[in-house]
């Protein structure tokens, strides 16, 4: 019995050590995103005014489409959010709420789109805690950070308010009210986003299950 306890203790120690020493990868291709069927980790985000927002409490009230994007400076992210606007009313009709999470700092999180009348909440994850918990965070090479700033006039340090140089891989997660991931789309190629029709069908399928 003592040997079994010792072995179990060693396994737990190794597992705990692995969690503690986990580091954000240096390449988007090396991320390990949360899988369908797994539970949404505990996530706290920031609203535009800096107040905290508990994602898990929001999810418990209504099935949720979580859209994670790099920041307002990313044209591909803005195009995706504008595309999402076209099916927004259909998503809401299915009883699903939309929550978008940006790598921007709270005070520059803003509503995208020409009219600014999107019916979903935009939140900040500038500390990249949510992205890391979801397994979609990666560290940008310093040379690329400088290239963004010098060639494209994109200052990710200024926009995030942090010097961690971490970005999220743009992702879409559909979560039910029990906090279980029912659909996900995570693509290291930031230029490719989930098709709106596919997303809507996934949402309809979840609504029918309920």
Image: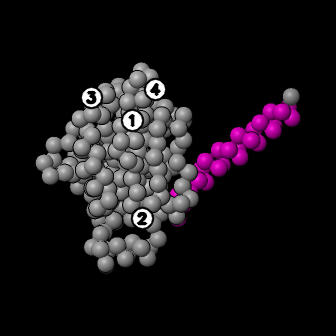
Mark 1 vs mark 2: in front: 1
Q: Nearer the viewer, mark 3 or mark 4?
A: 3
Residue placed most toward the observer, 23 or 169? 169
Q: Secondary structure at mark 3?
A: helix
- Residues at marks 1 and 2 touching, judged by CB atoms closer than 8 Å: no
Spatial CA distance of label 1 from label 4 is: 20 Å
Q: Is residue 165 above or below residue 113?
A: below
Pointer 1 residue: 201
User: Which percent across, then down, holds residue 77?
Assistant: 32, 56
Residue that appears at 40% across and 57% down: 192
First along the sequence among labels 1 and 4: 4
2 and 4 marks in contact (CB < 8 Å): no
Q: How many marks?
A: 4
Q: Which residue is mark 3?
A: 93
Residue 133 visible in image? no
Query: Foreground mark, 1 or 3?
Result: 1
The quarter of the image holding the C terminus is top left
Report the disc number at residue 178: 4
Q: Earlier in the sequence, mark 3 or mark 4?
A: 3
**What residue is shown with label 2?**
165
Instruction: Estimate the spatial distance between the alpha carbons at disc 3 and disc 4, rounded to whole Å.
Output: 20 Å
Residue at 56% x, 51% y: name it: 32
Q: Which residues are magenta?
A: 2-26
* Quarter of the view holding residue 60: top left
Tell me how far mark 3 sits from mark 2, CA to CA: 38 Å
Nearer the N terminus, badge 1 or badge 3? 3
Q: Of marks 3 and 2, which one's residue comes earlier in the chain?
A: 3
**Badge 1 element:** helix
Instruction: Give the farthest residue toward the bottom.
Output: 150
């Amino acid at each position: 019995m003592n040997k079994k306890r010792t072995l179990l203790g060693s396994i737990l120690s190794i597992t705990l050590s692995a969690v503690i020493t986990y580091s954000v990868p240096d390449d988007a291709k090396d991320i390990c995103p949360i899988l369908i069927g797994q539970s949404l980790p505990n996530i706290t985000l920031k609203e535009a005014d800096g107040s905290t927002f508990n994602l898990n409490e929001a999810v418990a009230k209504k099935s949720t489409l979580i859209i994670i994007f790099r920041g307002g400076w990313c044209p591909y992210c803005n195009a995706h959010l504008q595309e999402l606007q076209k099916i927004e009313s259909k998503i809401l009709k299915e009883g699903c709420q939309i929550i978008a999470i940006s790598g921007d700092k709270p005070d520059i999180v803003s509503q995208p789109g020409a009219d600014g009348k999107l019916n979903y909440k935009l939140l900040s994850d500038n500390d990249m805690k949510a992205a890391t918990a979801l397994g979609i965070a990666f560290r940008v090479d310093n040379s690329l950070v400088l290239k963004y700033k010098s060639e494209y006039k994109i200052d990710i340090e200024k926009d995030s308010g942090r010097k961690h140089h971490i970005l999220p891989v743009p992702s879409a997660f559909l979560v039910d009210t029990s906090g279980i991931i029912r659909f996900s789309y995570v693509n290291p190629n930031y230029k490719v986003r989930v098709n709106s029709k596919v997303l809507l069908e996934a949402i309809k399928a979840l609504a029918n299950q309920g």
